């Protein structure tokens, strides 16, 4: 079950003197039962009823926004006049015999309230002090049709994220002829571009914060467009049209024809929830939940200096997710027995698994050892750090590398996972700027065989006699993307031993399918570049430089080995 700290339920309670339902017995008592949920609550409520909340709840898991009927009217202002005009229009009222006495026709505040649920849910994602990833609107009177035990004791609503990536509606079959909730049926079919056979409920809906923000804009547009055409039902009419327009985005659970939500909560209890299959292939945003479900190994390679590895670990504590989320493994290339003993202790003290590589296998030998271990593990992703590669701390916020990119990225660990999950890259390099080379230049040019160099750079295929060429070919990039305010770019990104996140399949293609007896960085760079050009590997790189080389302990030059 997902932590309740990542879910906020949003609700609202107003007395509009609805005929046939006593406010105290039908709404207040149900609301009190709903308040027993252990989940975070964001509540819109009139001042005169606020005391009910604090009789049962505390500010640790409850946020109240005092919201009078006049506040609802102000929120609904762009739609107010048209809504009142339609509900008093004889043609609309006569569309069905039940409409005249319905609350949406009889009460000026009924539709403004129910048709503002999406707006209030969206506002809660922006104003909530809980800052959770998942938000759901739940009607305050939900326990009139859903057992109190489901809400309070079984805590079924804590399971909602498992069914709402990115957004969930509950729907029920509906057989219409003239109207649905007052909305002209043929017009609904025309807008949906197919025959409408179900209606999406307004009692529970929601999903990820990002999905809600997008859904809110869609909802606003459809509501405005339909009211302008003198078409009105309730919020459920708009939800239904959203679902028909984008069935690949809005997930649905199908209720029975009576529309009772208890079928859904009971199915959660029994573990039998089945979500309707999506149509289409929308590029859906990756959630933090999916990131937490991914397994990642972080390998750190060290050699003959516990001080260096400890320095890097201490620096990474300032971006602590690197040391608290993944499986940590320390690969030891040391030849000094005292250094090995000290490294073992550093590993124990910092929750690393210690792996003795049996001598100095070199930087690339260590890199291959990490690839082999990762391939046999149950992890989905891997990072490889040498012990002098560090994640820049928050103190570098506002500072930039020599290429003009940010040196510090908040929540970098989560975001690079989102990028990999969304785009299925084989590897994503974590730093655009390196010590000796920057990624705007195609370093593979130096290392590919001559026939490849002539093939890909026919007008510039001669290497310099010594050193680097200031006119080295530029990297060819394809597309720029953005996730969580971090930009990144795909294309012919060259491989280097600098830290990157690698997928399981990417690791196999890069290091497992083809192996060299004495691997080195230049060979891998050439090999992976050629696979990239054959469209067998998809790499990308951050347009940021949050990783830097920070060596404090040095060893003799003759001890440095590639393999």
Image (cartoon, rainbow, N blue to C red):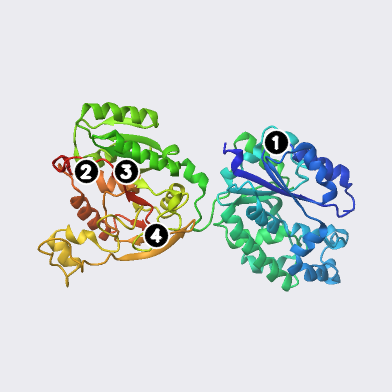
In the visual, does 391 lie left or right of 292? Answer: left
Numbered disc 4: secondary structure: loop
Question: Could you tell me which secondary element the residue under label 3 belongs to?
Answer: strand
Are there few (<14), some (14-19), or many (20+) residues within 10 Å of tag 3?
many
The Cα atoms of the two marked residues, 2 and 4, are separated by: 30 Å
Which residue is found at the position 66% from the left and 40% from the top? 39
| 544 relative to 123 in the view: left or right | left
In percent of width and height, residue 457 lies at 19, 68
The residue lying toward the viewer, choosing from 221 and 89, is: 221
- Rounded to the nearest angstrom, the CA distance separating label 3 from label 1 is 47 Å
Q: Is residue 500 above or below residue 176?
A: above
The answer to whether mark 2 and mark 1 are in CB contact below 8 A is: no
From this viewpoint, is residue 119 visible? yes
Give the quadrant of residue 187: bottom right
Tell me the distance, in whole angstroms, between the alpha carbons under discs 1 and 4.
52 Å
Return the x and y of residue 348 as percentages of the image width and height. Answer: 37, 28
Residue, disc 2: 364
Q: Callout 4 environment at 10 Å: few (<14), some (14 to 19), or many (20+)? A: some
Structural distance between the alpha carbons of marks 2 and 3: 12 Å
In this rendering, is residue 353 above or below 202? above
Q: Which residue position is annotated with label 3?
A: 385
**Residue 89's quadrant in the figure?**
bottom right
| Mark positioned earlier in the residue sequence (3 or 1) | 1
Relative depth, front residue between 157 and 469: 469
Q: Which residue is mark 4?
A: 400
Read off the residue under disc 1: 150
Give the mark nearer the N terminus: 2 vs 1: 1
For marks 3 and 4, the one nearer the N-term is 3
Q: Nearer the viewer, mark 3 or mark 1?
A: 3
Instruction: Look at the numbered disc 2 and give the secondary structure of its residue.
Output: helix
Q: Earlier in the sequence, mark 2 or mark 3?
A: 2
């Amino acid at each position: 079950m997902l932590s309740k700290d990542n879910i906020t339920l949003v609700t609202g309670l107003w007395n509009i003197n609805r005929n046939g339902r006593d406010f105290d017995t039908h709404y207040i008592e149900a609301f009190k039962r709903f308040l027993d949920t252990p989940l975070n609550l964001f509540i819109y409520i009139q001042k005169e009823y606020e005391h009910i909340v604090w009789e049962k709840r505390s500010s640790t898991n409850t946020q109240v926004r005092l919201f009078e009927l006049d506040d609802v009217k102000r929120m609904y202002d762009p739609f107010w006049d048209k809504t009142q005009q339609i509900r008093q229009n004889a043609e609309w009222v006569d569309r069905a015999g039940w409409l005249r006495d319905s609350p949406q026709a009889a009460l000026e505040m009924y539709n403004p309230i129910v048709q503002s649920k999406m707006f209030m849910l969206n506002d809660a994602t922006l104003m909530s002090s809980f800052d959770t990833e998942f938000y759901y609107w739940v009607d305050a009177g939900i326990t009139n049709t859903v057992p109190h035990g489901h809400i309070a004791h079984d805590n079924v609503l804590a399971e909602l994220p498992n069914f709402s990536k990115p957004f969930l509606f509950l729907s029920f079959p509906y057989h219409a002829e003239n109207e649905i909730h007052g909305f002209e049926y043929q017009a609904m079919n025309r807008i949906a571009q197919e025959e409408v056979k179900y209606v999406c409920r307004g009692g529970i809906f929601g999903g990820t914060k990002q999905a809600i923000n997008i859904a809110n804009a869609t909802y606003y547009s459809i509501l405005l467009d339909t009211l302008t055409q003198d078409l009105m039902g309730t919020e459920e009419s708009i939800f239904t049209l959203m679902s028909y327009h984008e069935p690949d985005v809005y997930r649905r659970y199908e209720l029975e024809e009576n529309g009772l939500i208890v079928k859904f909560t009971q199915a959660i209890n029994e573990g039998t929830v089945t979500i309707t299959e999506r149509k289409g292939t929308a590029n859906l945003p990756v959630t933090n939940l999916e990131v937490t479900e991914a397994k990642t190994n972080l390998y750190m390679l060290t050699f003959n200096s516990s001080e260096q590895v400890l320095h890097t670990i201490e620096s990474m504590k300032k971006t602590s997710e690197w040391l608290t989320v993944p499986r940590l493994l320390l690969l030891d290339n040391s030849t000094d027995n005292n250094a090995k003993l000290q490294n073992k202790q550093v590993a124990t003290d910092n929750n690393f698994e210690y792996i003795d590589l049996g001598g100095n296998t070199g930087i690339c030998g260590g890199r291959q050892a990490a690839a082999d271990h990762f391939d046999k593990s149950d992890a989905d992703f891997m990072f490889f750090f040498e012990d002098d590669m560090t994640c820049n701390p928050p103190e570098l916020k506002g500072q930039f590398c020599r290429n003009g990119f940010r040196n510090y990225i908040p929540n970098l660990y989560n975001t690079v996972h989102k990028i990999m999950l969304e785009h299925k890259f084989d590897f994503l390099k974590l730093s655009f700027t390196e010590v000796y080379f920057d990624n705007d230049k195609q370093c593979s040019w130096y290392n590919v065989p001559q026939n490849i160099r002539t093939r890909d750079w026919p007008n510039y295929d001669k290497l310099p006699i010594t050193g680097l060429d200031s006119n080295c070919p530029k990297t060819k990039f394809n597309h720029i993307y953005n996730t969580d305010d971090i930009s990144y770019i795909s294309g012919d990104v060259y491989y280097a031993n600098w830290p990157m996140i690698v997928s399981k399949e990417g690791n196999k293609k890069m290091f497992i399918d083809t192996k060299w007896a004495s691997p080195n960085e230049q060979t891998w760079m050439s090999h992976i570049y050629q696979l990239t050009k054959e469209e067998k590997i998809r790499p990308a790189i951050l347009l940021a430089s949050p990783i830097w080389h920070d060596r404090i302990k040095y060893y003799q030059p003759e001890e440095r080995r590639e393999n």
